[in-house]
Amino acid sequence: MSKINANEIKFLKNRSIIKFEGEDFLGEIGIDGRIFKALTLARISVGVISQQAIENGISILVQESDSEKAVNCLIDEFEAERKSGKVSQIYSINNVSVLGFVAEDFNKVLAELARNNVFPLLLNQIAAEKRVNIVVTSSQDEKAKNIIESEISKKPKTVHLAIIGHGNVGKTLIEQVLQSSEEIRRRKKIDLKVVAVANSRKIAFNKKGFDNNWNDEVLTAESPSSVNELIRFSKENQLENLIVVDNTASKDFVHNYHTLAENGFDLVSSNKIFNTLPIEEYRKLRYTLNKNNRRYLYETNVGAGLPLIDTIKLLHLSGENITRIKGVFSGTLSYVFNNFSLRDDKFSTIINEALEKGYTEPDPREDLSGNDVARKLLILARELDLINEFDDINIQNLVPESLLSVSKSEFLTRLNELDEEYQKIKQNQESGHVLRYVGDLHGDLQKDKGELDVKLVSVPATSALGQLKGSDSIFEIYTESYGENPIVIMGAGAGAKVTARGVFGDILRVSETK
């Protein structure tokens, strides 16, 4: 008898399970013998896959083409027992496949299958040989085979990415993934494949993974952008290890997170909207993620590529009492006030300069309103298990009321109306001070809610906040253990490259734990 290759998977398709169920078989002898005899006389090849305590029943594997005949011959054989109620039902489960393999750690294989929503219908183990046979539905057999292969051999694990939004960040991210894929496959044994790219109008699919011509395929795609289409594609092609990456700023797309998590997708997002929705919605997703064993990473929600959220999570989970988080959260407003504080130029000149450099949103009021900083501050508050809502935040809007409701083009032509007020604020500072637009989470953070303020402040030029340069962000994390000396995280807090790199880091972290 030839020895089985340890990495070989025996793969049998087009099978059916015949389920034979009954009660009160305790003490009955020869039931299983009668089953096999009846099937043998009917010239049906059988294989026992799972045998419960004989008083409950037995499961037998047959060729799918023999399933109807097998059920009928067993019904005939056990006619008396069916009439008396000893045999409750005999039926078939069609469209199944068998995978046989040798596994050193079968529990790990089982866990990986479960993570991908593959739950064997039957399994049996030969402990001495570490040989396992499992039966899965044919709609999941290829996926199961790929997962098992990755676990029992040195084959890289395939991770399938769906990129939603291919603007500055999304486009940069796709390019980073394509450029790094060979090195990641070699170094981390992870095969990253971008299999779907979508915008608000349409979605493009490529089961083998897009290459450098991805943009052409997106331009010629005909499928309308739809989460249901993405789920259908992933199931139809039996894709394992699924991650959806939200690079949009869409208020609508975030409402799909629940459905995606329920259908086997992990989530990575640079979109801040979801984490600032009402607390009930926020908690509902956490429940869905836990129930479905899915992960949701969003490091770039605050601080772009800086390791801020992760640091706060680790401190909080370790029991460290965080007493305050304060800093310059907006790269845009960092650039504006860093330059306005040091130069003699008018405030409107600096805003136009930031707009031309692409630092601001097309309508600078989106930055000047303070809402973006407020959202980031609320995200950090919720990392500390605080139940604050967006309405709890005190936000200083930097746009005068007279310019709030005018069109974008009119606002841009009337920017100079801001100059007098901000020049006055600048001149009325103490000597040696500079202006910074700051987010501040403080109060008793051991209670249900903290105090959240977003406002323009004057700080000493020699302070950590005062020494900020360019469009960098800075975050000061005060804790009980560190006292008056905060943990300071500072660096590039904006820009497509650093944001995409941060998103890429989240993708790799999810991939490595799969």
Image (cartoon, rainbow, N blue to C red):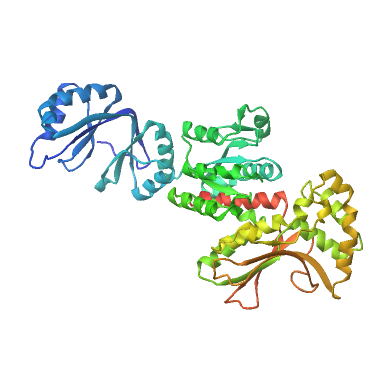
In-front residue for pair 278/43: 278
Q: Quadrant of residue 96?
A: top left
Residue 173 vertical placement versus 232 (above, below): below
In-front residue for pair 393/203: 393
**Residue plotted at (62% across, 44% down):** 177
**Residue plotted at (42% across, 34% down):** 142
Residue 184 in sight from this viewpoint: yes
Taking 142 as reference, is 363 left or right? Answer: right
From the top left corner, tell me how far across and down residue 476 is, in percent. Answer: 67, 69
From the top left corner, tell me how far across and down residue 509 is, in percent. Answer: 54, 53
Taking 399 as reference, is 309 left or right? Answer: left
Q: How many marks?
A: 0
Instruction: Tell me the quarter of the image containing the N terminus.
Output: top left
**Residue plotted at (67% across, 55% down):** 304
From the top left corner, tell me how far across and down residue 250 is, in percent. Answer: 65, 44
Residue 156 in sight from this viewpoint: no
Taking 92 as reference, is 55 left or right? Answer: left
Q: Quadrant of residue 444?
A: bottom right
In-front residue for pair 401/70: 401
Q: Quadrant of residue 58?
A: top left
Residue 58 vertical placement versus 369 (above, below): above
